[in-house]
Amino acid sequence: MNDYLKKQIAEIEQKITEAEALENDPELAEMARQDLKKLEIQKAELERLLTQQSAVSSSQSADDGKAVILEIRAAAGGDEAGLFAADLWRMYQRFAQSKGLKVEELDRSEGGIGNIKEVILKISGSGAYQLFQNESGVHRVQRIPKTESSGRIHTSTATVVVMPEIQENQFHLDPKEIEFEAFRSSGHGGQNVQKVSTAVRLRHKPTGIVVTCQTERQQARNRELAMNVLRSRLYQAEVEKKQKAESQARRVQVGSGERSEKIRTYNFPQNRVTDHRINKSWHDLENILDGNLDKIISMFLNPQN
C-alpha cells in the first residue's frame, strides 16, 4: 500500500510542477491556480494516508490473526441513513461469509421501516482483521429514497469502526472502573430471553463508554462479549491517540487521520462507488453492495494490482 501511495504522490507532484509553470501565462494563470489548489489538497490527503499507514504498520502484523469487532452506525440523514447502515451490514456479512469467516451479531438497535441505528458484529477466521482493517470511516450514499416523491437525490452517511478483538492479557480492565447492569433482552433470542435478565450493559466510568450485548441466551456469555468490545474500544482509543500525536508531529495539514473522515461514496444514479483515499471509482455499485468487495479490498492489500 505504501509503495502505491508514494507513486500516486509522485504523479501529483509532477502535475503540480506543470501547473506552476503555467502560472506565468496571463491567459492560463487563473486556471493553473485552481488546479494547483486541488492538486495540493489531493497530495496532502495521500500524504496523510501514507502517514497513517506507516504509523500502524508495526502493529498490523500482530493484529492480522485477530478477530474483528465491526461497528456500523447510522449518521446524518434520518431514516435513509438507517437504511444505508442496513445495506452496509448486509454487504459486510455477505463479504465475510464469502471468505469463510464466522459472523456473530453482538448487539443491534433498530429504527422503523427496516433501518438500523447501530449494529455490532464480531467477525472471526483466518485473515479477518487484514480484510477489514481499512473499512473504518464515514461511508456516504447518494440516492433517491423510496419515500421521496419529487425524485430528489438525498445524501446520507453511516460510520464504520473496525477494531481488532483484544484479549484480557493484552489490555487489562480494572473491574472497579466498570459499572455492570443486567436487563431483559429485546433482541432476537425469542421468548425465553425475555423472561430473565440475560442482556448486559457495561459502563467504563473514566471514559463514559457504554457497551451492551443481548444476543446470547446466557448472561455470562453476553458479559464476556461486552467486555471484549469494551476492551477493544479502549485499546483503539489509545491507538488513535498515538496516531494523532504522530500525525501532528509530522505537521500534516489536511485531514486528521481519524475515523470520522469520509472514505467512500456510493452513488446510485451513477452506479458508482468511489474510494476517496485512493481517488478510484468502480461502476458496479449493486454488485459491491451484494458483498463483492474483493476489487476494493485488493487495492489496499495488493495495490500493485
Image (tube, rainbow, N blue to C red):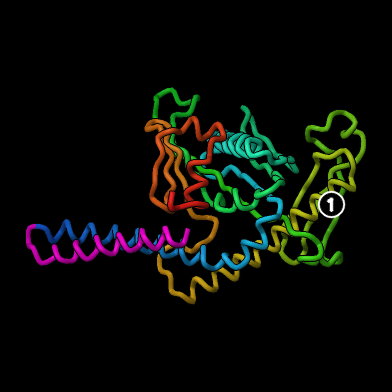
In the image, 26: left or right of 243?
A: left
Residue drawn at x 86%, y 66% is: 176
Residue drawn at x 75%, y 52% is: 211
Q: Furthest residue to the right?
A: 196
In the image, 128: left or right of 151?
A: right
4 drawn magenta: yes
Visible in this render: residue 109?
yes
How far across and how far down the image is residue 230, in percent? 75, 57
How far across and how far down the image is residue 5, in percent? 41, 60
Q: Furthest residue to the front?
A: 305
How far across and how far down the image is residue 262, in percent? 47, 51
Identify residue type, mark 1.
Glu
In the image, 47: left or right of 177?
A: left
Q: Is residue 10 above or below residue 74?
A: below
How far across and how far down the image is residue 86, in percent? 60, 35
The residue identified by callout 1 is 224
Q: Which residues are magenta?
A: 1-27
Residue drawn at x 63%, y 29% is: 114
